[in-house]
Amino acid sequence: MPHSPSSLAVLPTMSVYCGSEAVATYTSVQQEYSALTTGCGVTDANWRTGYFVSGEDRTRWLNGMLTNNVRDLAEGRGTYGFFLNPQGHVQGDAHIWHFGQHLLLTTDQAQVSKLHAFLDHFIIMDDVTLTPFTGEWSALLVTGPRAAEVLAAAGIPAAEAAQLSGTQLHWHGTPLYVLRREATPASNSSEQFELWIHPATKQALFNALVAQSATPAGSDAMELWRITQGIPLYGTDIRERDIPQEINQDARALHFAKGCYIGQEIVERIRSRGKVHRQFTGFTVIGTLPVPNTFIQREGRDIGEITSAALLPETAGNLAVALGYLRREFGAPATVLEIEGATLTVAPPPFVTNKKD
């Protein structure tokens, strides 16, 4: 597991994140979070995993599974979407990347076993093979406004890559996939690249990025960064009972002209009605930071719930924020709500931080 070179002053701490053991912190979460939001951080993302999707029917089959458009995906491009059951409930999420004779499906360890069973169930008469990454490919995340600059300095051209584009190249003779994730609108700190390389070479690549001024950043800082950007996490913010439009990721995850897929009838029915009763949003918090699964009430009635919360270490002091779901009639920005021990103000993410550039 990559650690930084000998410059680390303290021993990294470990935790479990997204279904896999991970480095929680290398030095301090404040320093690492600062790198992710104002500079460049490199993260050993061994909680990331996925499949090579191959076979003659791979594109048609996967297009019939995902809520986004795989059929018209150009080579070297990617997309994000949900997998739904016939009742329209989200069973998992993933990015799909087109690399000619195969597609990459990338997701988190916490959901991969269940997602594999779900997908395999729908491979009936299709020429489709799902080959797991296990043992052959491992991921690093390079995050922050200086990410492309640091990658270039380490010999990995990335500055010209468009969002949601993927490149297959070699780094010091070792095959490498470079996947540029989508940036969060209105945020200048959401740049992120996912690098996939053989596990035996990952340490060398990690060290090379640190040598070019990337800061080692653990899963604790990455979780803060995720909440700052308002990115919902499957299993935490996205549950099996949720339907796509509630998650408020329509532009990112849904395509309404791609043709049929599992659960499409429910998605289209909701679209024709024009709204859902509740939506995923963000809150700033004054008072006690709420724990996940805390319900928001008004006049004794549940109107929302908290799914994630964090204290963001900012230059002017910690900023308390949360993510969760709220009924639409209470969801206007700046709406003030009360829960036990705290006041919530509706603030759709990404959250505005007070860090200095």
Image (tube, grey):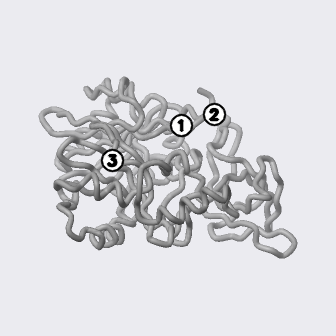
Mark closer to the chain start, 2 or 3:
3
> Label 2 is placed on what type of residue?
Lys
Q: Residues within 10 Å of mark 3 (few under 14, many from 20)?
A: some
SS state under label 2: loop
Between 19 and 59, the one nearer to me in the picture: 59
How far is disc 2 from disc 1 in space, using C-alphas? 8 Å
Mark closer to the chain start, 2 or 1:
1
Closest to the camera, between mark 1 and mark 3, is 3
SS state under label 3: loop
Residue 33 in the image: state x and y as whole percent. Answer: 52, 43
Between 25 and 357, the one nearer to me in the picture: 357
Instruction: Check contact, mark 2 vs mark 1: CB within 8 A.
Output: yes
Q: Quadrant of residue 273?
A: bottom right
Q: Residues within 10 Å of mark 2 (few under 14, many from 20)?
A: few
Residue 4 in the image: state x and y as whole percent. Answer: 33, 42
Between 100 and 220, the one nearer to me in the picture: 100
SS state under label 1: helix
Q: Is residue 357 left or right of residue 140?
A: right
Q: Quadrant of residue 326?
A: bottom right
x 20%, y 33%: residue: 169
Q: Which residue is mark 2?
A: 355
Residue 128 in the image: state x and y as whole percent. Answer: 20, 60
How far is disc 2 from disc 3 in space, using C-alphas? 41 Å
Q: Which residue is mark 1?
A: 37
How far is disc 1 from disc 3 in space, using C-alphas? 35 Å
Q: Which residue is mark 3?
A: 71
x 56%, y 67%: residue: 242
